[in-house]
Amino acid sequence: MLRRHEARAAPKRLSRQDTSRSSFMLRFVNVRSKDKFEIQKSYEIREKKRRESGAEARSMDVESNN
């Protein structure tokens, strides 16, 4: 955790190994999983609204999402 923060804060202090592709990919994966969580959350909220409003709203929602 600390190393990833340092990579963002002070790249000059890091060795060449720490700024390698693998550490970059590690940060990238971390960002992606956060996005996935946000998408999942908004999807769950949409599902809840759909269930509350019934079948007609559901079919309209599907059309607007595509």
Image (tube, rainbow, N blue to C red):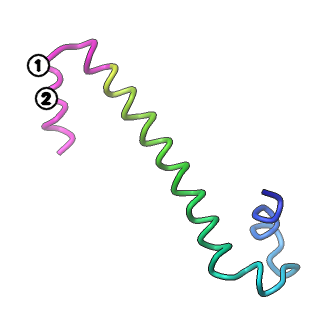
Is residue 41 located in the magenta-colored stretch of the structure? no
Looking at the rendering, in which quadrant would you find the N terminus?
A: bottom right
Residue 59 x/y as whole percent? 12, 28
Residue at 11% of width from left, 19% of height from top?
56
Question: Does dot 2 land on a helix, a strand or a loop?
Answer: helix
Left or right, 16 with reference to 43: right
Residue 38 x/y as whole percent? 48, 41
**Outermost residue toward the right in this view:** 13
Asked if residue 41 is positioned above or below residue 50 in the image, the reply reads: below
Residue at 41% of width from left, 34% of height from top?
42
Question: Does dot 1 land on a helix, a strand or a loop?
Answer: helix
- Amino acid type at circle 1 is Glu
Residue 66 x/y as whole percent? 17, 45
Q: Which residues are magenta?
A: 49-66
Q: Main secondary structure of the magenta part?
A: helix
Residue at label 1? 56
- Amino acid type at circle 2 is Met
Residue at label 2? 60
Left or right, 55 with reference to 42: left
Which of the 4 image quarters holds residue 31?
bottom right
Spatial CA span between label 2 and label 1: 7 Å
